[in-house]
Image: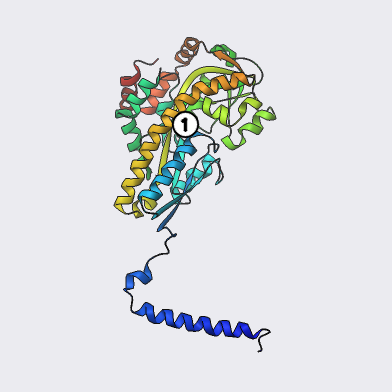
Amino acid sequence: MTHDNDNNSGKTTLSRRQLLKAGAVGAALPLFSIMSRPANAAEFNYKFATGQDPSHPVNKRAQQAIDRIREASNGRLEIKLFPANQLGSDTDLMSQIRNGGVEFFNQASVVLSTLVPAAGIVNTGFAFHDYKEVWQAMDGPLGAYVRAQIEKVGLLTMSKPWDNGFRQITTSTKPIKTAGDLKGLKLRVPAAPMLTSLFTALGASPTPINFNEVYSSLQTRLVEGQENPLAIISTARLYEVQKFCTISNHVWDAYWILGNRRAFEKLPKDIQEIVRRELDKAATDERADIASLAGFARNDLQGKGVQIIEADKESFKQALAQANFYKDMRAKFGDEAWKLLQNSVGGLG
């Protein structure tokens, strides 16, 4: 075999010499320096999936936490964020977080309740009156109870709960003011039994659809309306396909940052502590974002031509009581959990 270019063979010989020389020098070096990883390679490369639009505070604060974790761990843990259901629908990701396909996943209580029924207690219709009640419960005994139930299915909760906000109703066909206005309304809900139960009790026709299909379902009029926190309605641009927004605060919802237990326990203890600390800080920041964004989103939606309606909440509560909704929820969640909820919000039903 001949070389087309003599310089090639010269370069090959030279590089071999250089390698042999480097090898001789390397033999004199301590073993750890040879085995140490390249400066830019992490020991652990993990994925963090979310269903929210990249502009949502969940992703903004998660990315900041990821950056702080990388820095505080000296690059040993590299986490890549995958927003907007890039790695699958919420139900797909529920499987992936359990089998280790993703290491971290942000999931709303309403959907998590399909796997951990107790997680749904925070979504009891018209239970929380305001954020004071919410955080008293979630940073206290009720939150501790829910976390314990989540961990029983083998998942870890990585921080205190983040805020998904109070959920509101939007429609394209008619404004919703009282419970009676919901009668027969085709309303998209997440694949979550709690919301299906709630809107069935209120006389609507709830239709479970994964979030990544919500916009097209509204656009094609497969459903007339949907319900979500204002931050989601705004960042997912649902105002483009909806005319009315009812401030109902019908359900408050938590976001839980879930961790795959095996993956998390592989991390050295010092990195585990960094992850928990930074995700807790991110939770505090994200809660503040949602509180301020709710006010901004309301004005933003109005500015984009969406009609804002204040719900007659008493009519909804009366309809739920008449349908035995609260009685059924107490039976579903059990006396212990129900007592923890009522300790924070007062009597229900």
Q: Secondary structure at mark 1?
A: helix
Residue under label 1, please give it.
110
Which residue occupies 37% across, 69% down?
35
Side of 222 where 91 appears, left or right: left
Which residue occupies 41% across, 80% down?
23
In the image, residue 116 sits, relative to residue 178, either above or below, namely below
Quarter of the image with the C terminus in it: top left
Which residue occupies 40% across, 54% down?
75
**Which residue, as the protein is rendered here, is positioned at the far bottom?**
1
Q: Quadrant of residue 32?
A: bottom left
Which residue occupies 63% across, 21% down?
304
Q: Residues within 10 Å of mark 1 (few under 14, many from 20)?
A: many
In the image, what residue type sits under mark 1?
Val
Q: Is residue 89 visible?
A: yes
Position in image of residue 96 (x %, y %): 48, 48
Q: Quadrant of residue 330?
A: top left
Q: Is residue 162 visible?
A: no
Side of 46 where 246 appears, left or right: right
Position in image of residue 348 (x %, y %): 38, 16
Quarter of the image with the N terminus in it: bottom right
Side of 160 where 253 appears, left or right: right
Position in image of residue 204 (x %, y %): 57, 20
Compare residues 33 and 325 and report the one nearer the observer: 33
Q: How is the structure coloured here?
A: rainbow
Q: How many numbered circles does the render carry?
A: 1
Position in image of residue 129 (x %, y %): 40, 17
Q: Quadrant of residue 33?
A: bottom left
